[in-house]
Amino acid sequence: MLKPITLSGFRIKKNYEDSAFQHLYEKLFCGNSASLSESEKLQLLKWAVFFFNRGDDGVKRLGYRIIVRYANEFKDYKPLYDIAINAGFIPVAKFIEREYLNDNDIDRSFLRNFLSAYKTFFKDGNKYLSVEQKRLLDFSKSIIADSLVVAPTSYGKSEMMISKVEDNLDKKICIIVPSKALLAQTKRRLLESQPITTTAKRILTHPEMFQHGEKADKFFISTLTQERLFRLIQKDPQFSLDVLLIDEAHNLLSGDERGALLLQVLLVLKHRNPNMELKFYTPFIASAKSLESPYSKYELKSAHAKEFIKIEKYFVYDAKGTKDLSFYDQFMDRNTIIEENVPLTEFEFIKAHKAEKNIIYLNKPRDVESAAVKLCNTSPDIEMSGDESGIFNDSYKAIAEFLHPDYKLLGCLKKGIIYHHGRMPEIIRLYIESLFSENAKFSFVVTSSTLLEGVNIPAEKMFLLSTKRGRSMLSRASFKNLTGRVCRFSEIFSEKTGNLRMLEPEIYLIHGEYATKKPPHDFLSDQAKIKSEDRDEVENLLLKKSPENEDELEKIRAALEYIENIQEGAIDKALQENGFDKIRYVTSDIAKTCFKNNIHDFDIHLNEATLLLNHQSFINKEAVGDVNTLLETIYRIFIKDVQLKEENGEFARLEHGAARKFYAMLLDWKMNGTSYNQMIHSFLHYWKELEEKARPHEQIPVYVGSSWGEITRFENEHLPRYIDLRKKDNKQRVNIAIVKIKEEQDFIDYNLMKYIDALNDLDLIEGPFYDRIKYGSSDQKVICLLKNGISMELSKCLLSGAYNDFLTFNLANDEVYIQKAAINAMAKNNENKILIFELQFHAV
């Protein structure tokens, strides 16, 4: 048997350089295709077919790439049609059939009828699936064992999960998603399924929505973040699931706190119900073994997409150096200059090479806003027809009213530009995603890694101004996930706007103001080069098969202890022989409560005696009933004399009385259900008071975190986490307030509330006061709406009296039913468009 041709063999210098193949291949891809003769085109096609039939996976993709480029360049789609049929790329074949072939091009014969029947077999609703898509869908539907589905972005993983839910309506099922924004999107997708809405009374999205004990539901459908599911596990020792679906499962590989928490959730739930089905869905994981923890007994069956319908084209523009534009070939791992000395700034270059819809990626939220404003400054206002103008004005007014008229996003909207990052309110992110997707006048979305968390928007080209994610470079998997966001199948094969040029997504790396020192070509060689075998970067210690050093061993031991103190027996007893038999268990109520509430700011075992002493001093005191006493109690129980971890500096700020006073103010706003707009004005007033109290020319340091910080305040600080308020005008302060409110809300929700919940578990807080802190109201209908995932702003609107006929409450079970007719009623009453948009996620 003949050995397949390998890509590594192609890359050998003597095999490729100065060869006839190089000569013709680079003509086709490096801007000189017009000079190809008919015989040269034919030779390229012969090579392509030979590669496709005789090569390893990499060489097959190279052959396919040549045929796609040939088809798009010369508008001759017959060779691509033949390859698509042969490879099972049914959507490609059907598109070519519909757009480019006539009856004379397809034999009126048995073969034609056979092919027609064959393609119809892959029809799913109003779209066609590829062979691999159908294989993965069938695998996902039929497999009962714990399993993993790996499929590129736009392959229909969301549809697979919805289908899995539809097939398990008589079970307790949950979809884990990585963000609150995705909760709303997933809930809406579930509500769009008739089998689901016919069977399920509601979609559970919050721990407080679940019933416990005798009232517990025998089956339910839920979608939660890992934090919410973990809280539910802690709250109810009897809680278990029958089916758990994990979206964006590659997040488990991460070594951060959220990745560790997600795995802890899986291990505890698998212990409570060993028969629970685990279903992982992700666009990239090389091996199912990477998701199998040695501290549990689950094994995964897997199905990986092996086809390659899209082939990216990578370009590098050196905006701050040579000004050369080059083409990077991921097959040959070579860089070829295609245009020298391009006299453009990075933003002029972007506009010169833009498509109708474009994504611009940066690492930091501050850089996202900076780049968006710079792009705006050189862009004209968009021109709109009467209808378009009305929609735009409504959207502009809605955001201005919801937040503030000086929000810089509003200026960007006028230019057809939006920006998108994690320091924006979730509902605003969802709203502008919808604006961008539905309005052709919006050309650019400038975004950070929030785009990696399942955000699906139409885009044809991507421009990376940075190749970092957080403090590290984009990993190979993250880069693949990011670039997969452009040219989705639904856009490529759309009957109205589809175009096979999108089979070749254009990805531009721009080495300019926001870039790292690492040359873009080196980055592409590391992260984009076609390799014979990809390997997973496993950073989650609870997924590692063996620790690499004593430090890792100690961290694993601590993580296992954490799980065992939440759910004794969750860790496989066979681990005792590996040295993990000396698990420490806490004994005091306060230490158990710390574990129950996922507190990580200090070592609970090490500080148990101090915590117990601090707690005992409060046992006979009156229950806490105001925000100032609440913050002081948190300080005296959980911070005073407690040895905090150095890496958890945000919580340590509460050592300072001024910080406690500040958070007491924020909690007071939260208690009173203060709107975002009101909070912005309150921040401006608060800062004005600080300015009036300060001495002339004295710095006014305001904490904004490392993402936005410009100055340091204390000598031992390594990163700037503060700004000097005195140097900011009112418009700048408005925009700082918006991101700071989001950052502080996240700190309260994800950190401070753990301690408030802990105090409540210890019966140290008044019940009505706790409800107002947690929900911003003591009104049971408001609380019910909030528990069902509805914002305070929308809750107030719905309970204003105008929409009572559309609401049905069952307060005993925290249930609410909202009729879809409420959407039209709100529109008729000219309610804020953002609130109407939000209601679409909840009304049925």
Image: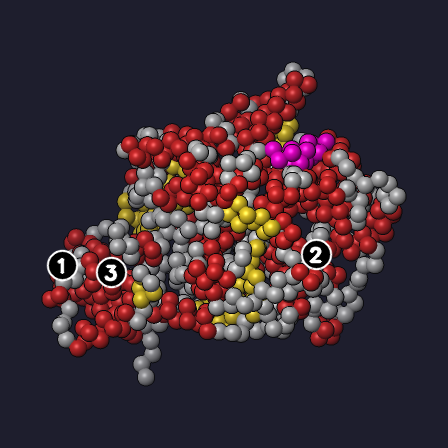
Which residue is painted at 31% across and 66% down in the image?
123
Q: Amino acid at mark 2?
A: Lys
Q: Is residue 213 visible?
A: yes
Read off the residue under disc 2. 235
* Residue 115, above or below 256: below
Mark 1 or mark 2, which is nearer the start of the sequence? 1
Res. 533 image quadrant: bottom left
Q: Which residues are magenta?
A: 661-674
Q: Main secondary structure of the magenta part?
A: helix
Q: Is residue 239 left or right of residue 359?
A: right
Q: Is residue 203 left or right of residue 761?
A: left
Q: Which mark's residue is nearer the viewer, 2 or 1?
A: 2
Identify the coloring: secondary structure
Few, some or many residues within 10 Å of mark 3 (<14, 14–19, 20+): many
In percent of width and height, residue 399 lies at 46, 33
User: In 3D space, how far apart are the residues under numbered discs 2 and 1 (Cα atoms)?
Assistant: 72 Å
Read off the residue under disc 3. 95
Q: Amino acid at mark 1?
A: Ser
Q: Secondary structure at mark 3?
A: helix
Q: Amino acid at mark 3?
A: Phe
Of residue 802 and residue 345, the one placed in the foreground of this image is 802
Which residue is painted at 79% across and 39% down in the image?
624
Q: Secondary structure at mark 2?
A: helix
In the rendered structure, does residue 414 fall within the stretch colored magenta? no
Read off the residue under disc 1. 37
In percent of width and height, residue 612 lies at 85, 50
